[in-house]
Image (cartoon, grey):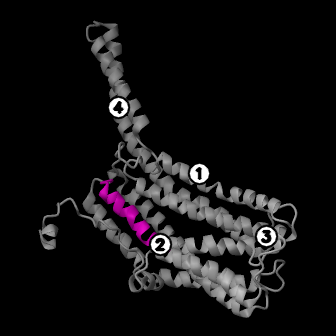
Amino acid sequence: MSASDRVVAAPAAAEFPKTPFAIDERDPLARLLRLRLRLGWVHVLIIALVIYGPVEKLIVPAFGGYLRLSGPFGQWRPDVVAFLTGFLLYPLILAFYMWIASGIGSVFIGLAENRSFGAMDRYDSFLNRVQLSYDRRVWSFLSLTLAIAIVMVIHYVLWSPSASIEIWFGFDNMPHRIFALVLIGLVSYAGMQILLRHMLLVRWLQRLLHDMGDDLIIHPYHTDDAGGLGCIGQYAVRLSWLLGLVMLYFVAGSLLPSLQAGGTLKISLWNPAVTVGWIAYILVVPLSFLWLLLPVHVAMTAVRDRQLTVLSDRLESQLNMARQAAAGERRNLSSILKEVEHIKSMRNMILEDYPTWPVSASLRRQISLSTIIPPAVHLLISLALSIIPT
C-alpha cells in the first residue's frame, strides 16, 4: 500500500494531528534551533551542558588563570552557585524551553485524542484559536525586553563592585563578564518564553472549561488514572521539576555568603535582586499551579457531581416509595430496598472511581518529590562542608 493510499484509508475519527502543533513559529531563536539546525530538546540540553558547564566554568577560567578548585570549599572558583547553574539549571531551562513548544501542544492534542469533550467540532475550532494566540511576534519581543532587563540587573546590581559578594571570575574580568552575560541573556530569554507560554496555557485552559465545561467527559477508567485529562498532569509534573531546580538555585544563592565565610550555613538575602527573586518565586509558583490545576479540578468535580445528583434523586424517590410500602402493604418493600442498595453501590462507586484531579497518584508523588530538592541540597552542601576542609 502506498503512502497516499494509507492517508485515504485513515479512519474518519482521526480528526486531529497525531503530533502536537508547534507554538513557536514566531520565535526566532526556536526557529533557528528547531528548523534550521534541526535540534530537539535533547540536543539543546547536551550542547548547553557543554557550553555552560565545562567550557565556561572550567576551560575558560583555566586558560585565564582564575580556576581554583582547591583549598576551602567556600573559596573555590567557580563557586557552588556557578557550578549549579552551569551544569544543571541553565541547560535544563534551555531544554525545557525547547520541549514546552510541543509539551503545551500535547496538552490540547491529548484532550482531543482522549475525546474529553462531547462537541469535538467546537473543540477543533477552539484549538485553532489557541494556536493563533501563540503565533504572534509580540511574545518574542516581550521575552527579549525582559531578558535585557534581567541582564542589566545582573550587570549593574548583582555584579556591581559594591555588591557584598564578589562574582567568582572577578569584578574587573570584562571578557568573561561579557561572555557570561550573553549566556545568561539566552537563558533569560528562554525563561521568559517559558513563563509567557505557560501563562497562555493557563488562560486557554480556563477559557476552555468556561466555554465547554458542560461538554467535559470524564473517563473514570482511562489508563492515565486521571479521567483522560492526565496530559495536564504530565505537563504539571515536568514543570514542577524545573521549578524545583529554580528554587534550588535561589537556596544555593542565598547560602553563598555563609559558604564563603565558612561555619554555619544560613539563608541570607544579601542583595536586593536576591530578595526580589525570592518574592517573585514565592508568588508566581503557587499561583501558577493553582491557576493551572484548580479550574480543571472544579470542572471534573462538577461532572462527577452531576452523576451523583441523578443517583441522589433516584435514591430519594426510592426511599419515599419504601416509606409508603412500609406504611401499607409490604410486598414491594423487598424489591424497593434492593434497588436502594443498588443505587447506593453505584453512588459509592462513582465517589471512589471518578477522578477529580487531572493528576494521577504516581504523578502526585513526583510533584511532591520535586519539592524535596531544595532541602536536600542544603543537607548535601552541609555534608560536603563536613568532609571537605574549610
The quadrant the C terminus occupies is bottom right
Q: Position of residue 52 (x, y in %)?
A: 61, 79
Of the residues under marks 3 and 2, which one precedes in the sequence? 2
The kind of residue on which mark 4 rests is: Leu
Q: Which residue is mark 3?
A: 256
Q: Which residue is mark 4?
A: 311
Of the residues under marks 1 and 3, which one precedes in the sequence? 3
Query: Badge 3: few (under 14), some or many (20 or more) residues near its Cα, within 10 Å?
Result: many
Q: From mark 2 to mark 1, how far is it between C-alphas?
A: 25 Å
Q: From mark 4 to mark 3, how far is it between C-alphas?
A: 60 Å
The kind of residue on which mark 1 rests is: Ser
The kind of residue on which mark 2 rests is: Val
**Residue at the limit of the structure toward the bottom, as seen here:** 175
Identify the secondary structure beneath mark 2.
Answer: helix
Q: Which residue is mark 1?
A: 368
Q: Which residue is mark 2?
A: 42
Task: Verify CB contact (< 8 Å) between mark 3 and mark 2.
Answer: no
From where the camera sits, is residue 303 visible? yes
From where the camera sits, is residue 193 visible? no
Task: Verify CB contact (< 8 Å) between mark 4 and mark 1.
Answer: no
Q: Nearer the viewer, mark 4 or mark 1?
A: 1
Q: From mark 2 to mark 4, how far is it between C-alphas?
A: 50 Å
